[in-house]
Image (cartoon, rainbow, N blue to C red):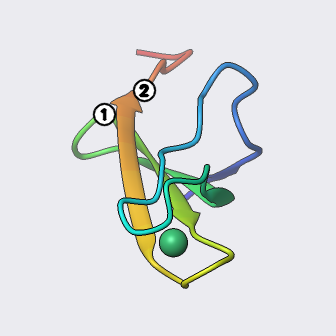
Amino acid sequence: MEIFKQPERLSAPICAKCGIAMTWINSALIKAERTVLHKFTCQNCGNSSQIRTPAKLAKE
Ligand SMILES: [Zn+2]
């Protein structure tokens, strides 16, 4: 998997328990699904969350 830096326009999810913005961990391209999986964690309670966005593949 290719590792990406945090997308600038991607807003962090809000922790359901704490109501605060979660911290981005990493993003990875899933070529089979053509999506980028962004992982977040809550610094307060350790809750984790994921966001999927469409992957923009340069070479098709
Ligand atoms: Zn939390």
Q: Which residue is under mark 1?
A: 34
Q: What residue is at 58 percent from the left and 41 percent from the top?
A: 12
Q: Nearer the viewer, residue 26 or 21?
A: 21
In the depicted structure, whether residue 8 falls above or below residue 13: above
Give the quarter of the image for residue 36.
top left
Relative horizontal placement of residue 6, taking residue 60 as reference (left or right): right
Q: Nearer the viewer, residue 5 or 49?
A: 49
Which amino acid lies under the numbered mark 1 shown in the image of this protein?
Arg
Which amino acid lies under the numbered mark 2 shown in the image of this protein?
Ala
Relative horizontal placement of residue 16, taking residue 47 as reference (left or right): left
In the depicted structure, whether residue 12 falls above or below residue 57: below
Q: Quadrant of the C terminus?
A: top left
Q: What residue is at 59 percent from the left and 30 percent from the top?
A: 11
Q: Residue furthest bottom?
A: 46
Q: Where is residue 56 drawn, in percent x and y?
A: 48, 18
Q: Circle 2 — which element?
A: loop
For the residues marked 2 and 1, what is the alpha-carbon distance in whole angstroms? 5 Å
Tag 2 near tag 1, CB within 8 Å: yes
Relative horizontal placement of residue 33, taking residue 37 as reference (left or right): left
Query: Disc 2 or 1, which lies upstream in sequence?
Result: 1
Q: What residue is at 38 percent from the left and 30 percent from the top?
A: 53
Q: Where is residue 26 drawn, in percent x and y?
A: 65, 60
Q: Which residue is under mark 2?
A: 55
Relative horizontal placement of residue 31, taking residue 42 as reference (left or right): left
Q: Circle 1 — which element?
A: loop
Q: Where is residue 35 drawn, in percent x and y?
A: 34, 36
Q: Nearer the viewer, residue 22 or 28?
A: 22
